Image (cartoon, helix red, strand yellow):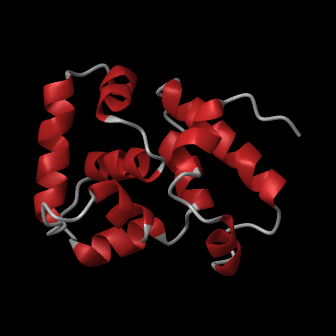
Amino acid sequence: IIITQAKISDTFFSNVDINLIKEKNIVDNNDEFLISISELIQLANENDDTFYIKFKEMFPDFEEKMLKTNSTLKPLDLEFCAYIKLNFTTKEIARIKNISIRAVEGRKYRIRKALKITQDDNMYTWISQL
């Protein structure tokens, strides 16, 4: 299977270990996972309303873990965290959501604060490890 989106290998998998994913039983087959990630990225890029629903299907414990860390996170915060878990940049999130880069930075700052992620910790790494 050929995945045409370089983003999958260049961005997402630069921070994700396939063996760890298998150990957590997220998927049984790497090809299926690549296709699912590709579909998620496509839905995200299209700002499709079903993006977060599909994301929750693929990462069923993610929302629960996020809310366990801070139960006051809003649905939009959780969606932003999903983009971060998929390694979307601030600029990409701004384009997708049709908001300013500064608005995305502000949202990420509030999420960082709500999750008590220190400045020494990489937010992308912290969220991807959930």
- Number of marks: 0
Q: Is residue 51 above or below residue 100?
A: below
Image quadrant holding the N terminus, namely: top right
* Residue 106 percent coordinates (x, y): 11, 39
Within the image, what quadrant is residue 63 found in? bottom left
Within the image, what quadrant is residue 8 found in? top right
* Residue 85 percent coordinates (x, y): 43, 53
Within the image, what quadrant is residue 65 found in? bottom left
Q: Is residue 48 visible?
A: no
Q: In this view, does 68 lie above or below 53?
A: below
Q: 86 left or right of 28?
A: left
Nearer-the-camera pick, 117 or 45? 117
Residue at the (31%, 19%) spot, across then down:
98
Q: Is residue 22 visible?
A: yes
Nearer-the-camera pick, 70 or 128? 128
Q: Is residue 105 above or below residue 84?
A: above
Nearer-the-camera pick, 123 or 81? 123
Nearer-the-camera pick, 74 or 129? 129
* Residue 94 percent coordinates (x, y): 30, 26
Image quadrant holding the C terminus, namely: bottom left
* Residue 58 percent coordinates (x, y): 62, 59
Q: 117 left or right of 17?
A: left
Residue at the (25%, 75%) spot, across then down:
69
Q: In this view, does 2 lie above or below 29?
A: above
Residue found at the very far right of the displayed protein: 1
Residue at the (38%, 27%) spot, across then down:
92
Residue at the (63%, 78%) spot, across then down:
24
